[in-house]
Image (spheres, rainbow, N blue to C red):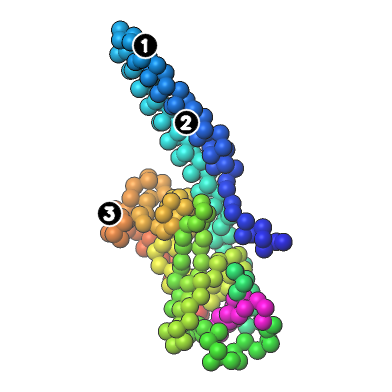
Amino acid sequence: MKKQEQNKPYLHPARRNLVLFGVPTYLVLVTFLILLSVWKIDTGEYFVLSWFTAVCAVLFLALSAGMIWLSHRVFLKEAETERARYAYLLSPPKPIDLSKERVTVEDDGVRYIFTELGLKIEDETVKSTGQVFEEHDSGKIILWKNADVYLATRNLERRVTIALAVYSGETEISAFVPITESVYSAVCALGLDKDFGEGWTYLKYNPKDAFRQLLKRGYIREMYHAKTGEMFVDKYGNFLGDETVITVENSNETENKNARDE
């Protein structure tokens, strides 16, 4: 039952109200203006046609501008909801020792098990034997030492999905693991987040705008200063302004990693 609830299509309450009430009201009012204009033309009241047409045009523009503004407000609420849903990404990860415990997450009938040495992938109907690295030839194990790790993002049905993309060139096995709070802790404990790139750094630096871009197009294309709002990295990856924002963040991550290694 819980899994069915997770897979159930989600519509933000503000979006639902816009679809159920806002859009029909807008269409009814616009249709009324059109029919009234046609009726005025048919009655031949040409002496009022000029000012009446201007009034209708102004009302139509006002209604359209209101719908655009309302749609934008709904979009901002959706982005804020998605940011709150991934709030744990903006906080320090919980300490975890993968040499003593495992992190397990299930998605679409597949179970992903994080250990210190690698990622085990198995069907949820298959019972685990407890021996993680047996049956390596079965192609269900990706060792971290042979893996390429990326941050994968997308938007689907007005929701943001952030996942860990793992690929093994040795076995040609790939996996897309949804990042939950426990997966986030495991990823940071393994140091895999160091390969996520500037998009990950920007998400933590300016999460408000990052989640707006993720909800809009599924990925981060531009980067803006959190205080001034000025763009400093364009969609082509060119720095336009202050480069120190991302550079400082990356330096901090490097220092933290070195401290952990020591």
227 vs 14, left or right, is: left
Dot 3: few (<14), some (14–19), or many (≥20) neighbours within 10 Å?
Answer: few
Dot 2 and dot 1 residues touching (CB under 8 Å) = no
Q: Give the structural element (helix, strand or loop) at label 2.
A: helix
Q: Amino acid at mark 2?
A: Leu
Residue carrying label 2:
27
In percent of the image, x 44 and y 88: which residue is there? 170
Label number found at residue 43:
1
3D distance between C-alphas at marks 2 and 1: 24 Å
Q: Which mark is residue 64?
A: none
Q: Which residues are magenta?
A: 111-126
The label number, if any, that marks residue 240 in the structure image: 3
Residue 75 coordinates in the image, percent (x, y): 48, 44
Asked whether residue 207 appears in the rendered view, the answer is no
Q: Secondary structure at mark 3?
A: loop
Residue 6's place in the image compared with 216, above or below, is below
In terms of sequence position, does the residue under pointer 3 or pointer 2 come before the other? 2
